[in-house]
Amino acid sequence: MEAEAREVVAATGADPASATVERLADGRFAGQGFEFTIPLPPGPYGEEAVRERFRDAFLTAYRERYAFAPPALGIEFTNIRTVVRAGEPAVRGLAGSAPGDARPVRERPVHFREAGGFVPTLVMWREALAPGAAFDGPAVVEEAGSTLIIGPGARARVSAEGNIVVDLPGGAP
């Protein structure tokens, strides 16, 4: 689970070396109708030692919460999970992009009702927009998971945090 989670963290652009790992389990005594979440000790786990280590972690957490643990009851774990956290990745522009850079990838016609039909429109890749970039609509900003349409008369800029801020015609943000 940890290896898979680290792959996801790396795919976001965050530094996997800066990641923290937390192992958790939802457990209960046999017959109880509710679970509570406990931290698990660091891995890796061997097959024989894992049962004892998980049992000890559960009993310790149970005693901390309830001040005692019932004797001789079986322990059931209903969920075991690994959480890998890393800081937000740095805002990246396209290789060679500089603050204020907003190079279009291509131009294509896009229909805007307020313009009365199709208008030649700049198309840009989101990852190519560095903080400080600014451009006027009409424009289309594309990325893998979404598309942002900036209509005619609007102005877009990329904040220091990497957010695209669009100012609409007439002063409405």
Image: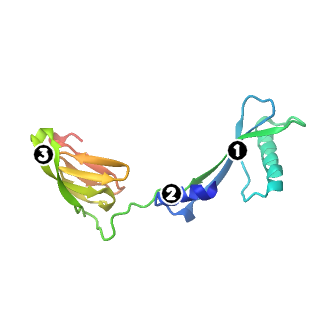
Based on the displayed image, in which of its 4 quarters is residue 31 positioned? top right
Residue 154's spot in the image, x, y percent?
A: 18, 46
Secondary structure category for the residue under label 3? strand
Work out whether residue 130 can be spotted: no
Residue at the spot of label 1? 25
Kindly identify the amino acid type of the residue bearing the numbered disc 3: Phe
Residue at the spot of label 2? 87
Residue 63's spot in the image, x, y percent?
A: 81, 40
Based on the displayed image, in which of its 4 quarters is residue 76 positioned? top right
Q: Residue at x 28, y 49 (%)?
A: 165
3D distance between C-alphas at marks 1 and 2: 24 Å
Choose between 100 and 7: the one closer to the eye.
Answer: 7
Quadrant location, the C terminus: top left
Q: Is residue 148 above or below residue 12?
A: above
Q: Is residue 115 above or below residue 19?
A: above
Q: Tell me which numbered mark, 1 or 3, is placed earlier along the sequence.
A: 1
3D distance between C-alphas at marks 1 and 3: 56 Å
Return the residue found at the far right: 72
Q: Tell me which numbered mark, 1 or 2, is placed earlier along the sequence.
A: 1
Q: Tell me which numbered mark, 2 or 3, is placed earlier along the sequence.
A: 2
Mark 2 is surrounded, within 10 Å at the Cα level, by few (under 14), some (14 to 19) or many (20 or more) other residues, namely few
Residue at the spot of label 3? 118
User: Which circle, 1 or 2, is nearer the viewer?
Assistant: 1
Do the numbered discs 1 and 2 sit on residues whose CB atoms are within 8 Å? Answer: no
Position of 28 with respect to 143 (left or right) is right
Q: Residue at x 24, y 51 (%)?
A: 140
User: Which circle, 2 or 3, is nearer the viewer?
Assistant: 3
Choose between 167 and 53: the one closer to the eye.
Answer: 53
